[in-house]
Image (cartoon, grey):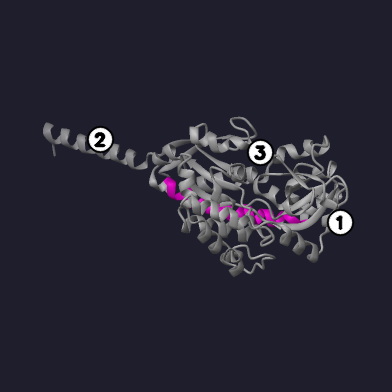
Amino acid sequence: MKLTRRLALATGLALGLGGALGSAATAQETINLTAIDGYPARAMWVQEFSNFFIPRVNEELAKTGAYQINWMEAYGGQIVKPRGVLEGIKLGLGDIGIVTTIFHNSALPSQGISAVTPFVAADARVVAQAVDEIAREFPQMSAELAAENQVYLATGVVLDTYQMFSKTPINSLADIEGLKVAGAGYNLRYLEGIPGAAGVRGGLPNFYNMLQTGVVDAAMLWPEAAKTFKIAEVAPYMLRADLGAVNSKTVTVNADVWEGLPQDVKDVLQAVAIEYRDHVAGVAMDRATASREAYVAGGGTIVELSPEARQAWADAMPNIAVEWAKEIDVAGGPGSAMLAAYMDKLKAAGMTPLRDWSAEATN
């Protein structure tokens, strides 16, 4: 059977169109994203972002094959310093990153919710979930980040609990009196009930030098960080006070970048951010015991603060939680409601607070 010229042209056009449609259906769009953090790659949460978050995003996107991300990772001051991540993502120096929220109490006050409630929960997994649930139930946290041109993905808790590391032995609260203690953000206020103790603001990468040079006598950090940053070399005494796990890392995306992402990619980033939240908290708890053992192996000595002394320390503090909540209330936010809801979540998870910070607001 002979094909007419018109039929041949029509057949060729149909085949060509079908091939083009087939190519379009299978085409994979590549999206460039730059991930930033000012902390070095050896910091646990940065390692896990690189080794867990990014591979999991890639794995989920590969299931459909419609999109792939070309990642550029810039850590340890390549683009920003630790305190510069919030500003860096705001300005578009990075597309996605891990904001250390304790450096930004003015811009991100609601992120301080676990820091202002010490002596309640020393379990990073419980705190991470409770804070993230608060963020999803109350618009306050997302609104604060929106004002910084960022979209909230999830809150992370990288420390099992704050402890006190010192150059000289600390066996009681009296031994902390008169000491200069390094800290970051709200935890400096934990010292206010201890006579003569003075908080000195610093960042984790600087604590070693601050202790070595005598700028401070002690520092509040957690065992995993003490191991990673070799704190036993300059602060060979740890007071195990179990001050509490604190959310200090939040994964955010530049709002302009987010606006341009396909919905499927947004969904994957949001889902994996929650996985990362739980994964990092789990790693923190898994490493807690090993990190304490490594601290001792590195020459450190650990002293347990007695239950009575822990209670005395908690009772001596001003109620920074109620102060925090009222400041947010005055600014038009739901500070008191967030605090009450957060404490309820911790208690429902089995935590027993040495002080019920929110209950004191009504007494």
**Element type at marker 3?**
loop
Image depth: mark 3 or mark 2 in front:
3
* Residue at point 73%, 37% (across, down): 206
Q: Position of residue 123 (x, y in %)?
A: 67, 60
Q: Which mark is residue 41?
A: 3
**Element type at marker 2?**
helix
Marks 3/2 in contact by CB < 8 Å: the verdict is no
Say which label, 3 or 2, has the lower sequence index: 2
Quarter containing the C terminus: bottom right
Which residue in the structure is indicated by mark 1? Answer: 171
Is residue 160 one of those drawn in magenta? no
Question: Residue 342 vs residue 288: left or right?
Answer: left
Which residue in the structure is indicated by mark 2? Answer: 16
* Residue at point 82%, 34% (across, down): 213
* Residue at point 39%, 39% (across, down): 260
Say which label, 2 or 1, has the lower sequence index: 2
Quarter containing the N terminus: top left
Depth check: 50 or 125 in front? Answer: 125
Q: Choose top left, top right, bottom left or bottom right for residue 6.
A: top left
Question: Residue 33 vs residue 322: left or right?
Answer: left
Marks 2/1 in contact by CB < 8 Å: the verdict is no
Alpha carbon separation for disc pair 2 and 1: 81 Å
- Local crowd size for mark 2, using a 10 Å CA cut-off: few (<14), some (14–19), many (≥20): few
- Local crowd size for mark 3, using a 10 Å CA cut-off: few (<14), some (14–19), many (≥20): some
Question: Residue 362 vs residue 235: left or right?
Answer: left
